[in-house]
Amino acid sequence: MTEEINNKVTMEKIVSLCRRRGFIFPSSEIYGGLSSCWDYGPLGVEMKRNVKEAWWKDMVQSRDDMVGLDTSILMHPQVWVASGHLKSFSDPLVECKSCKKRWRADDLEKRVCPECGCELTEPRQFNLMFKTFMGPVEDESAVVYLRPETAQGMFVNFVNTVNSTRKKLPFGIAQVGKSFRNEITTGNFIFRDREFEQMEIEYFIKPGTQDKWFEYWINERINWWQKLGMRKEHLKFRQHSKEELAHYALGCFDINFLFPMGWAELEGIASRGDYDLTQHANCSGKSLLYNDEETKAQYLPYVIEPSAGVDRGMLAFLCDAYDEDIADGEERAILRLHPRIAPIKIAVLPLSKKEPLANLAREIFNNLRTDWMVQYDDTQSIGRRYRRQDEIGTPFCVTVDFQSLDDSQVTVRERDSMQQIRIPIAELKGILSAKLAGEALTEGTVGWRAHSK
């Protein structure tokens, strides 16, 4: 992180919005909560699902060189011996000699306790993996670990994947799943958690082509974040120095995002060589060689690994999209979320709860929600309802008024510009589909008119 911060939004505003509108709640809150654990609420679970589905569609569904896996959280303990996690997956820990609180040594600028200002112990290494027992007996033979990353499940299934899919290099294995790290120091809302989700790819390539594919995935991944609306000025690369790199790594770039607390890692892209497959082949005694039909050679592929956090992605999208402006002389909080990740795509707002207007509005609502997540809201003034939808990032509102009963048309309002359009109900689905897909407001057969409400 640097001294530079994003002054447009504070973490306090994001936390308040998430709690108030049902994006994210503290876990086990009625019992006082559990540190660094969070529950995704009705809107949060939809947005998180949209982020994962957008990643899956673009990284797996839309490509013919990618397949998916969903591997077990619990794995054989030897997996973590082979990967090096049991030996070296640790952070430097210091403990306050007075209050006994523990801190990551590399997070502290001064060698005093941030809590009470007292003296700290010398740093020692603290393994970040969660340990548990499998079965009824709690002894060393029953020890297993909650996975600290999803990657190893893809490495140990490399041969299974090749044999079952007949994929040829280069190809990738993708996975979205939970990981667990017993972080010493957490904080900054959902930025660093002990339970989190990852979106990871292991892209297997022929040795000697790693530079080309490393550059390809660096550009591919930063372009993906921008494609989903993230502003270029809030993203930058940070190359790892030789001192930072793992001993087996050929190179690593972080995609950093300008969070309210400063620049911090959003995703890492690493060139890992053949280290992982070599380790698992040696420790398991099983061949993980790839048979190259073109050259008739056998070898262990090299790997490029793009690894992104779902929860950090959520936080970055929320921070990037948050804005405040003036509407009808009043301040308006707004999430300018890309339609693909907005939790609610459309809101249906009848001007009256009474029949027959409410009946027509319900028919429109039921018709639209077969295709999208749609919200029905008939409480308070239309202006207040618009503000609520703006604050949760809903791209379009459909207002059903009394004129709709006569002309079978409704008013559609766009979130960012607050422009409105009057269109036939029969054409509503087609027009909304085009607009959600990115059609400009001035395109099409129907024009938009400025409106402030």
Image: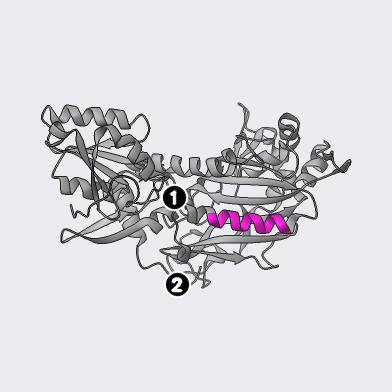
Percent across and percent down for residue 396 are 29, 45
The kind of residue tagged 1 is Met
Task: State the CA–CA distance, disc 2 to disc 1.
Answer: 21 Å
Residue placed furthest toward the right: 296
Which of the two labelled residues, at mark 2 and mark 1, occupies the earlier sequence position? 2
Q: Nearer the viewer, residue 126 or 204?
A: 204
Crowding near pointer 1: few (<14 within 10 Å), some, many (20+)? many
Q: SS of the residue at dot 2?
A: loop
Q: Which residue is mark 2?
A: 4
Q: Which residues, given as a range, are shown in magenta?
A: 212-223
Q: Quadrant of residue 287?
A: top right
Indicate whether 67 appears above or below 148. above
Check residue 215 for magenta coloring.
yes
* Circle number at residue 133: none
Dots 2 and 1: beta carbons under 8 Å?
no
Horizontally, is 407 left or right of 35 in the view? Answer: left
Percent across and percent down for residue 385 are 20, 45
Res 365 seen here: yes
Residue found at x 57% / y 41%? 62
The kind of residue tagged 2 is Glu
Indicate whether 363 appears above or below 279. above
Q: Which residue is mark 1?
A: 314
Q: SS of the residue at dot 1?
A: helix
Q: Main secondary structure of the magenta part?
A: helix
Q: Nearer the viewer, residue 394 or 309?
A: 394
Check residue 359 for magenta coloring.
no
